[in-house]
């Protein structure tokens, strides 16, 4: 049986600075929450120079009381979805969509990690002022 021998002492990936990062949707699939409820799991590839190859993740509950968050995510993709009624979604349609991620740092098990705070339309790298008349609150 092949074996691997490496020294992982002190190996860690530092969290990216908080801020806005261009990204693309690289994976989208239906999963199950810890409570056994359906959710949409989305993986992003960070495209920011210096952070290429980094990943980010977001989950969207498919429960009726949380669909506002899924709607906000789908709106940010700027794809041709009818967001004002019934929606049948093929997760493959999300792949390759360009977005901007607002990333924050959070401590988890003693380490600083990144978390996706908000998904915004592509090109909105400079925050609320880049949102124009609608403002970031609408995203």
Image: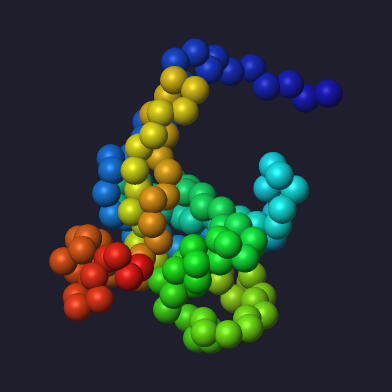
Q: Nearer the viewer, residue 127 or 13?
A: 127
Report x, y in % for residue 70. Answer: 53, 66
Q: Using residue 111 as the reference point, say whether residue 22 is left or right of it.
A: left
Report x, y in % for residue 53. Answer: 44, 48
Q: Nearer the viewer, residue 12 or 99?
A: 99
Report x, y in % for residue 44. Answer: 49, 56
Q: Specify the farthest residue to the left.
A: 129
Q: Is residue 53 visible?
A: no
Residue under the image location 68 percent in, 48 percent down: 33
Q: Is residue 78 visible?
A: yes
Q: Is the residue 88 above or below the residue 113 in the image?
A: below
Report x, y in % for residue 124. Answer: 27, 67
Quadrant into which the C terminus falls = bottom left
Quadrant into which the N terminus falls = top right
Residue under the image location 25 percent in, 76 percent down: 134
Q: Specify the farthest residue to the front.
A: 65
Total marks shown come to: 0
Q: Is the residue 16 above or below the residue 73 in the image?
A: above
Residue under the image location 38 percent in, 57 percent down: 118
Give the colour scheme of this rendering. rainbow
Q: Is the residue 20 above or below the residue 114 in the image?
A: below
Q: Is the residue 70 above or below the residue 7 in the image?
A: below
Q: Using residue 137 as the reference point, say whether residue 32 is left or right of it.
A: right
């Amino acid at each position: 049986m092949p074996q691997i021998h490496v020294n992982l002492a002190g190996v860690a990936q530092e969290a990216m600075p908080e801020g806005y990062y261009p990204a693309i949707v690289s994976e989208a699939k239906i999963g199950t929450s810890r409570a056994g409820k359906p959710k949409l799991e989305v993986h992003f590839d960070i495209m920011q120079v210096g952070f290429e190859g980094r990943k980010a993740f977001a989950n969207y509950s498919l429960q009726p009381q949380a669909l506002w968050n899924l709607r906000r995510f789908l709106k940010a993709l700027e794809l041709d979805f009818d967001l004002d009624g019934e929606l049948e979604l093929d997760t493959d349609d999300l792949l390759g969509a360009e977005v901007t991620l607002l990333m924050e740092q959070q401590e988890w098990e003693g380490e600083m990690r990144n978390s996706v705070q908000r998904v915004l339309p592509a090109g909105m790298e400079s925050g609320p002022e880049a949102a124009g008349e609608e403002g970031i609150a609408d995203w």
